[in-house]
Image (cartoon, helix red, strand yellow):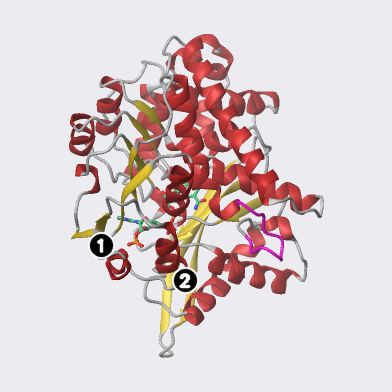
Amino acid sequence: MNARLDEKLEPIFQDVLHRNPGETEYHQAVHEVLETLGPVLVKYSEFADKKIIQRICEPERQIIFRVPWQDDSGEIQINRAFRVEFNSALGPYKGGMRFHPSVYLGIIKFLGFEQIFKNALTGLPIGGGKGGSDFDPKGKSDDEVMRFCQSLMTELYRHIGEYTDVPAGDIGVGGREIGYLFGQYKRITNRYESGVLTGKGLGWGGSLARKEATGYGTVFFTHEMLKARGDSLDGKRVVVSGSGNVAIYAIAKAHELGAKVIACSDSAGIIVDEDGINVETLKRLKEVERRRIKAYLEYHPKAKYTEHGNIWTVPCDIALPCATQNELNGNDAKTLVENGCIAVAEGANMPTTPEGIQLFQDAGLMYGPGKAANAGGVATSGLEMQQNASRDSWTFDYTQKRLEEIMIEIHKSCYETSVEFGAEGDYVLGANTTGFIRVAKAMNAMGVI
Ligand code: NDP
């Protein structure tokens, strides 16, 4: 944590440290938001009087439970799962489920906390929450994933619902997992409650363009940042970390808007393809065959693979971190700046460390934080909920248009807020402040709850 906090905010942060020991990612996420809220408390003194920040930092409800399941050899496995229902001032809790061995309460809390402000930025009536498990889907059979999802939902079902809490996907949770989770929810409750989960398959309540939404939205946001400086994506060299759901569709949209994405990665290595990353190959490898990125070479032998390489050393105009938290540190930020990078937009949640953010801001780069830049995913989940509620399904083009409009609006409100608070173009301040004020006003109106 580098930047100092306002004297009113420092004790609140100390309390968060004290109440949530060892949850370093959560501390980082809270600190980053508090850094920007000093001027807000000057303008809205009632938020301080009513202890809105202290209340926001304490989740409304946290659920931790055991998930026992049997693997293919008959052995019993035990995982731990979480659902943190953080804030419901604006609507039902909404946020994804993450399946990854690194998951623990501190990760789910950081994600849930960020989700509150991100969801507020979308302008849709959704609160913030997040969940997940330390289950590792890698190397598991479809049957094992199904049994795990069914066991998880056997507990989770009692805590969720279309007006209560609406989970979706995140790292390790895609269409396959949402299918198993929805099937078990339906079976236990005997209700076809489409709006209880988003990211569903097309044909059983899913929305066209949801799969593409986070990656597309990140690129729409990048495009808006460039436009605000009289520039565009046309002809830009782009590097995208990751090769999962967000990365694949960020690459696809960047190509569509005239940029060339020359590198992507997974946790084992990086691929550089100067001809431009082939999206169809990526989809086949990652969505169908579930293989490692190294296999890209089998289809494009001119590309280069580096085991455990650092993707941020690949010179580019635009960097889109789309893998995981803290994947881009101060040294990486320095390398990007030295190599002439002009814009960074976060498809992932909190991928840049505080040192990295500071470096980008000091260098005057366009920097779009995840809360704003990757809000297109949850926004389109909100659109999926709208379609479910009205028993309707929209076309791909219409849904994509709505997504684009929402991303343009998010950019506009972040930008205008940055101007209002005397920090033009500071999207961190813009996103945190805009999201916070919306939630705080609603909480204030609802009394002490
Ligand atoms: P996926 O599971 O589809 O893909 C994740 C990608 O990131 C994979 O390429 C994975 O590589 C890589 N990755 C994950 N963890 C690590 C790690 N510890 N080190 C290095 N690489 C890693 O997830 P998504 O694409 O859905 O999510 C990516 C990011 O976007 C996350 O931060 C998520 O929170 C955020 N996000 C996702 C949204 C969505 O709609 N899906 C919405 C908003 C944000 P490998 O396969 O080798 O593990």
Q: Is residue 432 visible?
A: no
Q: Name the mark nearer the viewer: 2 or 1.
A: 2
Residue type at tag 2: Val
In the image, is 333 to the left or to the right of 379? Answer: left
Q: Which residue is mark 1?
A: 268
Location of residue 264 with respect to 400 vertically, above or below = below
Determine the residue positioned at 42% across, 57% down.
279
Label ID, residue 254: none
Residue drawn 30% across and 34% down?
A: 317
* Cα–Cα gap, marks 2 and 1: 19 Å
Name the residue located 60 percent from the left edge and 52 percent from the top edge: 210
Residue 97 image offset from top left, x and y in percent: 51, 57
Left or right placement of residue 320 versus residue 95 in this view = left
Chain-order first, disc 2 or disc 1: 1
Foreground residue among 396 and 54: 396
**Would you identify the image quadrant in which residue 28 lies?**
top left
SS assignment at label 1 = loop
Q: Quadrant of residue 195?
A: bottom right
Q: Is residue 227 above or below residue 107?
A: above
Q: Quadrant of ligand 1?
A: bottom left
Vertical relation: 383 (above or below) 279: above
Range of residues picked out in magenta: 200-209
Depth check, front residue: 178 or 132: 178
82 to the left or right of 134: right
Quadrant for the C terminus in the image:
top right
